[in-house]
Each structure stands twice: as structure tokens, then as C-alpha cells.
Amino acid sequence: MHSSSTGLTDAAAAALAAPAPEATTDPLLRFRAAAAAHPERTAVTTPAGDRLTFAELDSRAGGLAAALTAAGVRPGTAVGISLARGVELVAALLAVWHAGAAYVPLDPAHPAERLDHVVRDAGITVVVAAGGGHRWAPEVRVVAPDATAAHPAPPVPVPPAAPAYVIYTSGSTGRPKGVTVTRGGVAQLLAALEARGIYRDAPGRVAWNASVSFDASVQQWARVCRGDGLLLLTDELRAEPEALAAYLLAHGATDLDTTPAHWSALRDQVAAAAERLPERPLRLFIGGEAVPPAMWTDLAGLAGRGLVRAVNLYGPTECTVDATAGWVTDGTPHIGTPLPGVGAHVLDDALRPAQEGELYLTGAGLAQGYLSRPGLTAERFVAAPSGPPGSRMYRTGDRVRRRPDGGLDYLGRVDHQVKVNGFRVELGEIEAALTDHPAVAAAVVVLRPDAAGATLAGYVVPRPGVTPDLGAVREHLAARLPAYMLPSLTALARLPLAVGGKVDRAALPDPAVEAVPDGGEAAEALPTGEFEVTVAEAWQEVLGRERVLATDDFFALGGHSLMALRVVANLKRQLGVVIPSRLVYQHPRLRDLAREAAQLAS
């Protein structure tokens, strides 16, 4: 591991490596050009203080690519990547491209059932993973992240239409669907953000915030392909605003990507750190969900003080991360104008141009479609009414309105898809998982605003004669869905129906809050011992409650993924114990989580 102080600070004014003409269509070739031009520049920095130069990262990626080729990976192959955020992850992503293949994120924090489904659905036979994690199917070959081969393998040339990655998003049918994005789409994304001036001309130090299973990560980690350095963020740092701000300041961060919900937790500490950064203003890439008006006004004020310059980015996974962009200035929230190379068409139900309607997108950033789902691909990627023969446009499902200045206002969805802390969620997938439980006859899930952004609320109707155990239902969900898709649960005798017979979502009651027991039952439920009391204090702080019980369920009290990260960070600070965030989902009852923390401490 390289440990010298050589980094981007020493060359802040240096020009980015000018790519060869053919490299503009392939981000991997851009990375190799950057490594050749500035081999000693720091490419990756970790919170532990480890550094990797561009030359070292190129060498690691090449060695792993040779091992992947030896394991049978060929151009177009889907390769699973199941690694925590670290230098090994960056090298593995580049190695898959080096081998001419496409990477498929397999988040180690996701439930085993979901990981196995993705492996089967994508036809994955090779996974890059460290030992001691998920038990992969016998037919899956596991390659260690530090593997090499006896004979080096040169980069495999691929056309722009070759797949670059497959990211799985929530599916309304109850199963996630894989979106296949091309190498040319990634090249188009980088070129468009450069042309718009959203990326700096000089090398940056980019704080990589998003999970690799979230498509916003591509816009962050692929910055290394143009010569920028990556500052890796752990889940613990993401949950601790003070520590994250100190890390950004210590390494002179120039760019940070975040969702509005996460920014609301980071704002005060990061804005204070931005006053002391050597290169101001800090560029804030904000997206994944709508920016509230009050936050927009505040960000515009920070821009006026020269501390933070925010750009609001909008785009579906199916169009390679970002399709429109708008700088946050005075006025009301908007999603900006189309990026270069992107066509944004506002159409009515008859596909005629309209001032207000559904947004359709065209351009080189369009994905190939949904992996092994030709029907759904044809439904969402429709024929364009104009342009060359075979032209397609993606139907976003987002309602927008054109502004007088040419920008776009986001008005909402035309379906039941929602955004939860930046993640796209099909409520139908959660509802399908709920009704798959033998005690549940019917279910509906809605999105409700909360102090941290938004939270999911689920309502279940039990089968006749059955008294549902909501704790068991939550365990059922946690075994099938990622953490950000877990709702609070409320049992109802029946779902409210509108006149037409559909569920009247507006008539659903507020989520149930479990009653506080009295007398002896209350005494038994009070937290006892160091670990229960400390967990209770962490929950009270994060959930904003005066009292919690040892029998309480974190998600039943309104907890969600961002809150879980804050709980983990709080417990590390108070107990000195690193608790994987997945344990909060596997053991949502306070007493059970405290027991797990005690076992880790011992």
C-alpha cells in the first residue's frame, strides 16, 4: 500500500490527462491515459490513511483482470462484485472493464436471498469477493480481490454498445430488475458533465458517498477515469457528520455527492468545514430525490457566501445516472436543463409535445434495457416519433413542466414508484413480499414524510382467524429486501377503499405506535444493563423520542436506513464496538440488538 504524501494537493492546478480520441468512447482507456500521464498522483485515499497511486491502481486492476480472464470471464460476461468500499472495490470495478466485461454490484449488506436471485437472474458464474461472507452457489467461482495470474492480460477492446454494468432496481412485480448500461453511456455521462462545467477542469478530490449498488456511485467512482482522486467514505463516516466533515477538511475535498435527506444531517458540519477548505466552494452534487424548497433556499445562500456550490442532478438508472442538471441559485427548486447529448421531451398521453406532461429521454446514455425482460424493455423503451430509424426514448414515469427559461420543474410520478433517501423503490415489490407471508391476506405500502426526509409505512390485513406477529413479518421482509426498503408495519382489519374499489391511500391512518405498558410489564420492558441502556439512548437521540423500551422495534418506531447508520455510529462512539449496520435490520428489537452488541464487545 502506497503511503507517501504525494497527492492531488501537490498538483491542484495540473491539467487532467488529455485522452486519446478513441478513449473518449471508453472510460477505461481514459483511466489508463491518466495513469500513464500522472502515475504518482494519488488515485484512492481511505479513512484509515491508506493511499494508492494511479500506477498502483492500474497495476492492481490489470492483475485482477488477468485472474478474471483465467477464471473464464469473457467480453460481455456479467461479473459479480461483492466487496466493502475500499481500494479493492475500485480496482475490481476497473478490472472487470479491463477484461471487457460488465460488473454487477452484490452488496454484502443485502439479504442472502436477494443476492442469490441477482446471481441467477444475471447469469453470474464469477464473483469477486473476500472470504468469510455470503455462501455462494457451488457453480459460482469466487475470485479474491487480490488475485493475479501468471500471464498479464491486455485491456480487451469493446465497442461503445458493450455492457459496462448491470444495476438492479426495485421491481413492481416483487422481484428486482437489472438495468444494463453501456460503456458508451458512461463515456457520454463523463463528457456531458465536463462540457456543462459541472466537473472541474483541474483534478478534484471526490468524496465517494453512494453505495456501489446505487447508480449515483458511477458518477462518483468513475471520476478516477479522468484523473480525479477518490476519497472513500465508510458507513461509519457517512453516519457521523462531525467525523465526515473533518475527513473532507483533512484531505481538501473538492466534491461531495449526497441525497437531500443525507445533506440535511450533514449540512451544519460540512458547511463549517467548507469555510476552511483550501479550494472553495465545495461542489455539492445533490440528487436522488426532490430538493425541498427550504433546503434549496439555504443552498443558494451558501453559494452566495462562497462555501458550497450545489448542482441538482436528475436522471433515472435507465439513462446512465444523470440526464439534466441545474445549479442551485435563488428561486424555486427545479431539475435544470438537459445535459449535452440528452434529449428531454415533455409529451402528453398521445405523445404530443406539451408544456406539462410525462418526461421522455433520448440520447447515447440510454441503457440497453432490462436484462432478460424483453416485454418490460419494450414497454419502457419506446420508439421515438422522430429521428433516425430505430431511435428509442425512455419513458421515465416522471411528470414535469417546462419553465420559461427552458428548465424543467419536477411535479411527481405517474405511478406508485417513490424515492426513499435517494433509492428508487417500487411499492409493489414491498407489497408483494408482505403478501408472501402466510399470515398476511392483503398489504399496502405508502411513503410518509418525516424529519429526516421520508419513511415507508406498511399496512397489513391478516388472513381470517390469524393474529399476525408483526415482528415475524418484519423478519420475513428483512430476509428478502434491502434495508432501505423495510417499512414500519401497522395491522388493520381491512384496507380503506375508494368508490372505484381501489385502496384509498389517503384514508390510511397514521402508522401505529406501540403502546407503553404499565406497572410490572413496564418494569420488565425497561432497558437494563450497560448495552441495553446505551442502545436505548442512541435510539432516543436518533428517533427523537423521550423513552424507548427494551421490547421496542426500531422500524416500528419509524426508523429507517439513514437513522440506522446514525445508531451504528453512536454505538461505536459510546461502546467502542463496530456494529455492522445489517445487524440493526436482523435484530430490530432493542434487547436483541443490545445482546448482539455485547457479544461483539466480548
Image (spheres, helix red, strand yellow):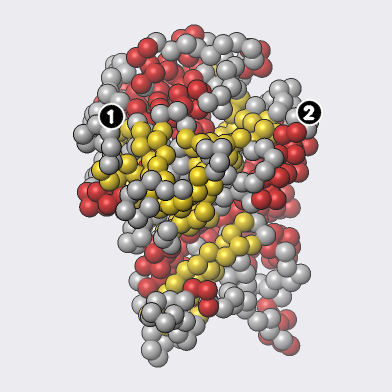
Where residue 592 sits: x, y (%)? Answer: 58, 67
Q: Quadrant of the C terminus?
A: bottom right
- Quarter of the image holding residue 462? bottom left
Give the number of the disc on residue 276: 2
Label 1: element kind: loop
In the image, residue 12 lies at what x, y percent? Answer: 64, 15
Tell me the kind of residue under disc 1. Answer: Ala
Q: Which label sits in the foreground, 2 or 1?
A: 1
Task: Report if residue 519 is visible in the image.
Answer: yes
Q: Which mark is residue 223?
A: none
* Nearer the observer, 513 or 134: 513
**Secondary structure of residue under mark 2:** loop
| 286 left or right, relative to 67 | right
**Which disc, if any, is residue 161?**
1
Taking the spot 59% from the left edge, 59% from the top edge, the residue there is 454
Vertical arrangement, residue 385 with respect to residue 76, above or below: below
Seen from the viewer's position, the closer of residues 114 and 431 is: 431
Picture layout, residue 541 above or below residue 169? below
Residue for point 53% across, 60% down: 585
Instruction: Kindly report the distance in space between the C-alpha atoms of the residues bearing marks 2 and 1.
Output: 44 Å
Identify which amino acid the numbered label 2 is placed on: Arg
Earlier residue among tags 2 and 1 = 1
Residue positioned 56% across, 78% down in the render: 509
Dot 1, how many residues are within 10 Å of its Cα: few (below 14), some (14-19), or many (20+)? some
